[in-house]
Amino acid sequence: MKEGIHPKYDYVVFKDNAAGHTFRIRSTLTSKDRIKWEDGKEYALVNLDTSSRSHPFYTGKQRQVEAGGRVDKFKKRFGTKA
């Protein structure tokens, strides 16, 4: 590999603000925020709005919307001009 053209690839801590869950993985992302991890070392902290811990698709709390019910509700509310 060529020297000096690749981004720094190091451990970063991601924090899911919705669930309060933190996890550490390697990434090229950087941040000015720092956090002390369980091993006593300081790592860059990247705040997330959602992750697999809080996203409805992964948690099974996904809301099912029936298209037919919404159409009937619309027709009932506004009627049909035929």
Image (cartoon, helix red, strand yellow):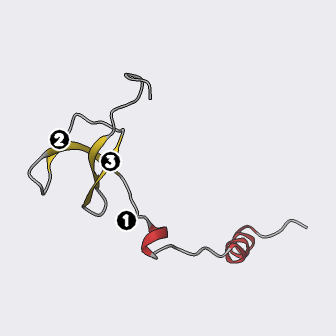
Residue wearing tag 3: 26
The kind of residue tagged 1 is Ser
Q: Position of residue 4 (x, y in %)?
A: 37, 22
Is residue 37 shown above or below 75? above
Mark 1 vs 3, N-terminal side: 3
Mark sitting on residue 4? none
Q: Quadrant of the N terminus?
A: top left
Is residue 51 shown above or below 67? above
Q: Secondary structure beneath disc 3? A: strand
**Tag nearer the camera, 2 or 3:** 3
Relative placement, left or right, of 56 versus 14 is: right
**Tag nearer the camera, 2 or 1:** 2
Q: Secondary structure beneath disc 2? A: strand
Q: Quadrant of the C terminus?
A: bottom right
> How far apart in space, not on screen, are marks 2 and 3 (Cα)?
15 Å
Q: Residue at x 14, y 52 (%)?
A: 37
Q: Position of residue 38 (x, y in %)?
A: 12, 57
The kind of residue tagged 2 is Arg
Residue wearing tag 1: 54
> How far apart in space, not on screen, are marks 1 and 3 (Cα)?
21 Å
- Depth order, front residue of 71/8: 8
**Tag nearer the camera, 1 or 3:** 3
Residue wearing tag 2: 34
Q: Label 3: few (<14), some or many (≥20) within 10 Å?
A: few
Furthest residue in direction top, as rendered:
4
The part of the image, by quadrant, that contains residue 61 is bottom left
CB within 8 Å, label 2 to label 3: no
